[in-house]
Image: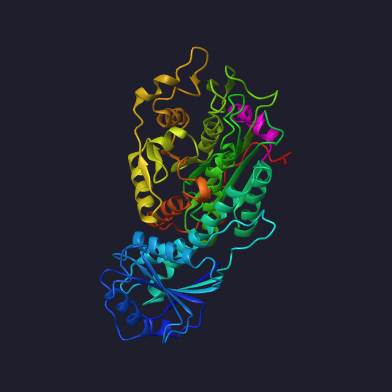
Amino acid sequence: MDFELNTLNLADAAREKCDAIVMLVTSTFKAGKDPLSLLAGEALKAKHLEAKAGKLLQAYRSAGIAAPRVVLAGAGDGSGKKVHAAVAAAVASLRSSGAKRLLICLPAGSAEDAVRAAVVGTAEASYVYVTTKSKPEGRELQRVHVAVEDSQRFKAAFAAAKGVASGIEFAREIANLPPNIATPTRLGEEAKGLAKAHGFQCEVMGPKEIARIGMGSFLSVAQGSEQPARFIVLQHQGGAAGDAPIVLVGKGITFDSGGISIKPSAEMDEMKFDMGGAASVLGTFRALGDIQPAINVVGLIPTCENMPDGKAVKPGDIVTSLSGQTIEILNTDAEGRLILCDALTYAERFKPSAVVDIATLTGACVVALGGVRSGLFSSDDALASALSAAGEAALDLCWRMPLDDEYADGLKSNFADVANVGGRAGGAITAAKFLQRFAAKFPWAHLDVAGTAWKSGAAKGATGRPVGLLVQYLLTEAANRPVAKPAKKAATKPAPKSRSKAKAK
């Protein structure tokens, strides 16, 4: 979908030739003399329209308006949150209308958050998964014009919003693919495609290279599947050569059967979404490719299947992680932390300024926070505050959870350095405490997105969260960092690489 930002008032908008107009109406709206204002004013006066966010009124072939369809959408106080709700409802109402070219008129006095919300809300509401359908119908909207008072003022915010929208859609598309297509190998290919299109550095390692590095915990999860594991390393070098990068680590379990500790069959199909963390990292890099912020970012994706084969890891097995710590596997369905811990240790070689891991990690987090907010765990207050603020700004919310030392007591083992589970009580926290053991050498945060990365029921599908949060965090960090002089070529240091450069097999 193509987005375009235009300087248009309501009188200009009424003359625009398009398939539909979405006009946002706030609680402080004052009608002018143009056809759109008069239409909205009459609707409000007759109480056929409310300015409450999400309330709609459709009109057809209105006098003085070139577009055949007009959707008047209540936008409350005009804030980003209300605009997002209004645009999402309006665009959803036009899904089956055949509209290909849409004009969205933002309220007078709108701020940057409203522009961002209009773009992202439109992209989210118009997304339809069609990749594996025999009749790919439903993706009708092709071009969206966003009308504001002064397009130049919102140029940067609009460009960032388009990048976020493309990143969210990319993440949703990858996560929605069936597990026989979205294999670890496919994720590696997608990473290479992003690197080629946007100039990232990319390395994709196979089982031999992963074993040579010493990722015994990661490979223990993969050993029960015929699909070979992949370890993906993506790098965006937008900052100065010596700047410490931010590392994003995404859990990439492309299908989670539970392994020997097998899951119930009901809704097991949704375990294709267990690579939602990996999808969000790929989606974030898709957005970085468009926006090109001045910051160094590394993406690490350990990806494999968790299957119950004769070679699969068993409850009671003990494995050795990349850090050298031994792990007693008491439950093979607690596999995400086993692949993430090795990736966290690998992150040390980049000497990062911060590391954020993203994972559909625990059902316990769904019980605690539902599908509204992602769980945020962090050993660093400043990092936690930055991520929380980014979530608020991006309307991609999270909530900080505790990390008291006492929560780690249940992870004690008589036979290894640590067990991989600690009982049902506080399950999301004990999972985070497990990961914290492998993240002591840098500021670290963990986002448990088990409740927010996808939806079940009639709306089943990936959400693309928390791409919005991650991109907003990175953009804020880039803006707050001092502008560094470009490094001389002779002084440029190569980015850290794995010990093996062999091709994945």
- Tell me residue 471's x, y (percent): 46, 54
Q: Which residue is outermost to the top?
A: 414
Q: Quadrant of the N terminus?
A: bottom right
Q: Residue at x 59, y 44 (%)?
A: 233
Nearest the viewer among 283 and 309 is 309
Image-quadrant location for residue 423: top left
Q: Is residue 456 left or right of residue 39?
A: right
Q: Residue at x 57, y 55 (%)?
A: 170
Q: Residue at x 34, y 28 (%)?
A: 404
- Tell me residue 250's x, y (percent): 53, 42
Q: Is residue 164 left or right of residue 134?
A: left
Figure check: 117 above or below 387:
below
Figure check: 279 above or below 2:
above
Q: Residue at x 45, y 61 (%)?
A: 121
- Tell me residue 220's x, y (percent): 62, 27
Nearest the viewer among 72 and 144 is 72
Q: Most prominent secondary structure in the magenta stretch?
A: helix
Evaluate whether residue 492 shows in this view. no
Q: Is residue 108 left or right of residue 230?
A: left
Queried whether the magenta region covers residue 219, the answer comes back as yes
Queried whether the magenta region covers residue 89, the answer comes back as no
Colour option used? rainbow
Nearest the viewer among 176 and 2 is 176
Evaluate whether residue 200 shows in this view. yes
Q: What is the magenta range?
A: 205-223
Q: Is residue 190 left or right of residue 333?
A: right
- Tell me residue 365's x, y (percent): 42, 36
Nearest the viewer among 319 and 35 is 35
